[in-house]
């Protein structure tokens, strides 16, 4: 083509150490010769373009005030290109730009750069008629400050097509990890430490009180273990990426797998507790079939969503059309996962309210106190989720971002904090102790001690369902011939004999 071009803009968040560009440029019409020169014209060391047939690299930072806006920065204000009287930007010094007086004749065929405004680095790579122009040692371009940076590749020569081949390596002051991921890496490292402490504390308490443990505590321990493995491998993936410049695919997908497992099990765990498991029942009967169906469906949808997201972000071989197809698939599984989340949240709150009604009817004040605290924790979590969702939407669609690109990780990080808040609350409410089994499977006796006229119905306040096994129903009265009952498979429930406390 004969139109001068400026292309290859690459924004990033980098530190103060160099960005390395290692690329080769060769003439499209004469690409058969593999040998070429490494002529770099820097106009006697000034770093500004001189008159030659070359491809130019301009590397410069975007100020925060415009980098955070949706429109981005006007490059002409930063010294790259000029704006003509017609209001249109001119990037290359061609015949039209010369006629308009926008550049000097000595800059003909070059990228227009204003010396007084341009604060970045510049390299011109000569492209010979036969052969390859190599960037060489001049391709090390330094960033003087952290923030969003642009690498512009300009072909303002004789209008010939030029192939750009090779790779560009971005390196921040801390290593190869992109600058916008560094905060997330530190956050994941802190989460790994917190999960390790929580896991050790809960595991030790379960060991000390092993004779009094209940199934819900084992589920909690598994959830904590899955959370620890998730953040450990995610932090390890980022650490290897920072040191070597490439992602460790195995660690990345292990982190995804355990992350999905953690979220699925935790949702099921909260649901089972709200259904009364370990509080008023030792079994959920036919409800478990529905719970397992949800668990499997959520794992599949969430894993595919996270896997395709990772594929879109990390696979450098995807074309634009292929990446668009992957993003469309991500949207589908994101919708399905969100639908399952809404479904289980409604199920959780409906079951929790029914269990609270049941405990109130049975005058189980200690258990009621636990369930009311659980409801408070869940309400706080939901309110935070609503608030943070609104904040995320505003941050996306505002003209100027609230969070900088370096802090975008906090949007996802806040969800992890919200999750950890709920998990920690449940772990404290059902922490291992010597009364855990008695509390789970025993019923509270009224303080008055008058039991003659009390009728117990352990299904009071709970909705009737064909899913419950009638053999497991715990209905009895003190006037029945068969006095007393055992609640739970452990045989340690309340036993009432002849209206006296056993």
Image (cartoon, rainbow, N blue to C red):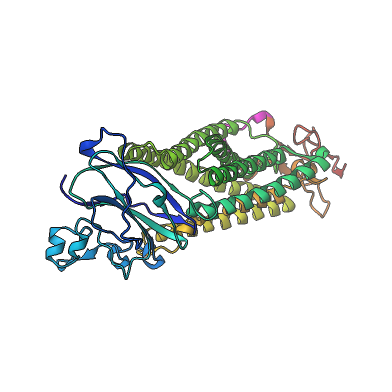
Relative to residue 148, is residue 457 drawn left or right?
A: right
The residue at 16%/44% (across/down) is 1
* Residue nearest the observer in this picture, 279 or 30: 30
The residue at 61%/57% (across/down) is 376
Magenta region, residue range: 463-471
Residue 457: x and y, percent? 69, 41
Residue 216: x and y, percent? 69, 40
| Quarter of the image that includes the C terminus | top right
Tell me if I can see residue 370 in this picture: yes
2 part of magenta stretch: no
Above or below, comparing residue 44 to residue 353 in the picture: below
Above or below, comparing residue 410 to residue 32 in the picture: below
Count of numbered circles in the view:
0
| Quarter assignment of residue 262 | top right
468 part of magenta stretch: yes
Residue 279: x and y, percent? 70, 44
Q: Residue furthest bottom?
A: 116
| Quarter assignment of residue 373 | bottom right
Residue 426: x and y, percent? 67, 49
Tell me if I can see residue 88 in this picture: no
The residue at 52%/36% (across/down) is 249
Above or below, comparing residue 460 to residue 106 in the picture: above
| Quarter assignment of residue 280 | top right
């Amino acid at each position: 083509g004969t139109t001068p071009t400026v292309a290859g803009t690459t924004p990033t968040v980098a530190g103060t150490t160099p960005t390395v560009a290692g690329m080769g440029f060769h003439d499209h019409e004469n690409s058969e010769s593999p040998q070429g020169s490494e002529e770099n014209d820097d106009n006697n060391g000034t770093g500004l373009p001189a008159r030659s047939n070359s491809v130019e690299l301009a590397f410069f930072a975007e100020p925060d005030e415009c980098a955070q806006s949706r429109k981005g920065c006007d490059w002409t204000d930063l010294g790259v290109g000029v704006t003509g009287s017609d209001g249109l930007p001119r990037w290359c010094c061609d015949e039209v730009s010369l006629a308009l007086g926008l550049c000097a004749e000595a800059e003909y065929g070059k990228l227009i750069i204003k010396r007084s405004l341009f604060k970045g680095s510049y390299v011109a790579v000569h492209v010979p008629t036969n052969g390859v122009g190599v960037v060489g040692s001049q391709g090390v371009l330094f960033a003087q400050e952290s923030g969003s940076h642009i690498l512009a590749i300009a072909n303002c020569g004789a209008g010939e097509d030029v192939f750009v081949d090779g790779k560009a390596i971005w390196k921040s002051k801390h290593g190869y990890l992109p600058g916008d991921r560094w905060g997330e890496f530190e956050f994941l490292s802190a989460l790994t430490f917190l999960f390790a402490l929580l896991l050790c504390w809960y595991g030790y308490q379960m060991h000390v009180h092993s004779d009094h443990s209940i199934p819900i505590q084992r589920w909690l321990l598994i959830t904590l273990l899955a959370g620890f493995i998730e953040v450990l491998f995610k932090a390890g993936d980022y650490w290897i990426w920072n040191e070597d410049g490439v992602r460790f695919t195995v660690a990345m997908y292990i982190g995804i797998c355990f992350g999905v497992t953690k979220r699925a099990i935790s949702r099921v765990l909260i649901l089972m507790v709200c259904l009364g498991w370990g509080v008023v029942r030792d079994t959920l009967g036919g409800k478990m079939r529905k719970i397992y169906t949800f668990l499997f469906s959520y794992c599949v949808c969430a894993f595919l969503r996270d896997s395709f997201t990772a594929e879109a972000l990390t696979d450098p071989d995807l074309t634009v059309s292929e990446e668009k197809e992957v993003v469309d698939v991500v949207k589908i599984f994101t919708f399905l996962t969100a639908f399952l989340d809404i479904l289980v949240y409604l199920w959780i709150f409906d079951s929790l309210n029914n269990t609270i009604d049941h405990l109130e009817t049975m005058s189980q004040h200690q258990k009621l106190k636990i369930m009311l605290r659980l409801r408070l924790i869940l309400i706080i979590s939901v309110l935070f989720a609503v608030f943070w969702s609104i904040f995320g939407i505003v941050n996306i669609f505002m003209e100027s971002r609230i969070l900088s690109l370096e802090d975008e990780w906090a949007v996802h990080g806040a969800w992890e904090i919200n999750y950890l808040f709920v998990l920690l609350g449940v772990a404290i409410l059902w922490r291992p102790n010597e009364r855990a089994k008695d509390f789970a499977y025993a019923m509270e006796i009224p303080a008055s001690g008058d039991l003659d006229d009390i009728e117990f119905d352990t299904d009071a306040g709970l909705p009737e369902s064909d899913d419950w096994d009638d053999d497991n129903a715990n209905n009895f009265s003190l006037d029945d011939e068969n006095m007393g009952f055992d609640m739970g498979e452990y045989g340690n429930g309340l036993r009432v004999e002849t209206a006296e406390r056993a």
